[in-house]
Image (spheres, rainbow, N blue to C red):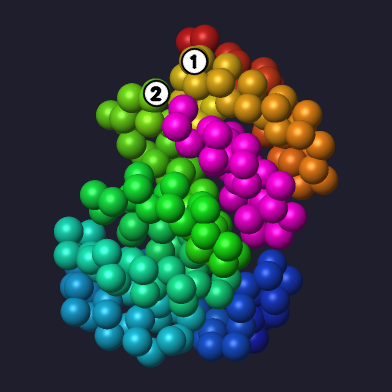
Amino acid sequence: MARSERLRENERVGIENARALGITIPELGQLARRVGQHHELAEELWATAIHEARILAAMVDEPGLVTNAQMEGWVLDFDSWDLCDGVCGLFEQTPVAWEKAVEWAAREEEFVRRAGFVLMCYLAMHDKQAGDERYLAFLPVIRRYATDERNFVKKAVNWALRQIGKRNRALNAAAIATGEAIRADGSRSGRWIAADALRELRGEAVQRRLKA
């Protein structure tokens, strides 16, 4: 895909283009593999404010060297969903990921709040050792902010609810109960979140996998 076509595709899917070059994620991934992990380079890339350079920064940074100050600074720079989601792939590997998920979900800034729910989603997808109680603690937060009408927030809330509900049968039941409560709360965004999540969580594919 030509750079100009990539930028037009960015516009179509709601990605900020003001400081974008039109480089694809696979291209960035290839570059990251050649570079390897490099914390100082990641900070330099972030400082450029170029969209793809910031995505690359998250790919090459070293999770063990990421600081709280860095996380708080970077999260305030999020200006599109793909940057938010890409950097959260780095942040989920830090010791404070669980704490930041709840803390950021309560923040008012659109992409900071999204980051909180994306972290919940990634932890549900990737942390195979965490007990159910850690995810159950996320469900009241998901319900609380299901009233947020902003598109990039409500989609992340929905995503987190679905991923938690796909971990095992107990969390599936708890997520379904949360979805029903969100629907009963009656907000427009909540009704959409609940309908979409409940459709998947009660669906044959998920139920068959959880019973296996």
Identify the residue under disc 2.
132
Residue 89, position as x, y percentages in the image: 38, 56
Seen in the picture, residue 21 relative to 60 is either above or below; the reply is below
* Mark 1 to mark 2 CA distance (whole Å): 8 Å
Q: Which mark is residue 170?
A: 1
Numbered mark located on residue 201 in the image? none
Q: Are marks 1 and 2 in contact (CB under 8 Å)?
A: yes
Query: Residue type at mark 1?
Result: Ala
Q: Was residue 141 drawn as part of the magenta stretch in this picture?
A: yes
**In which quadrant of the rendered view does residue 31 lie?**
bottom left
Residue stretch rendered in magenta on the structure: 136-163
Q: Confirm whether residue 26 shows in the render.
A: no
Percent across and percent down for residue 79 are: 55, 75
Q: Position of residue 171 (x, y in %)?
A: 50, 21
189 inside magenta stretch: no
Label 2: how many Cα within 10 Å (few below 14, some 14–19, many 20+): some
Where does the image place residue 34, in percent across and percent down from the top left? 24, 72
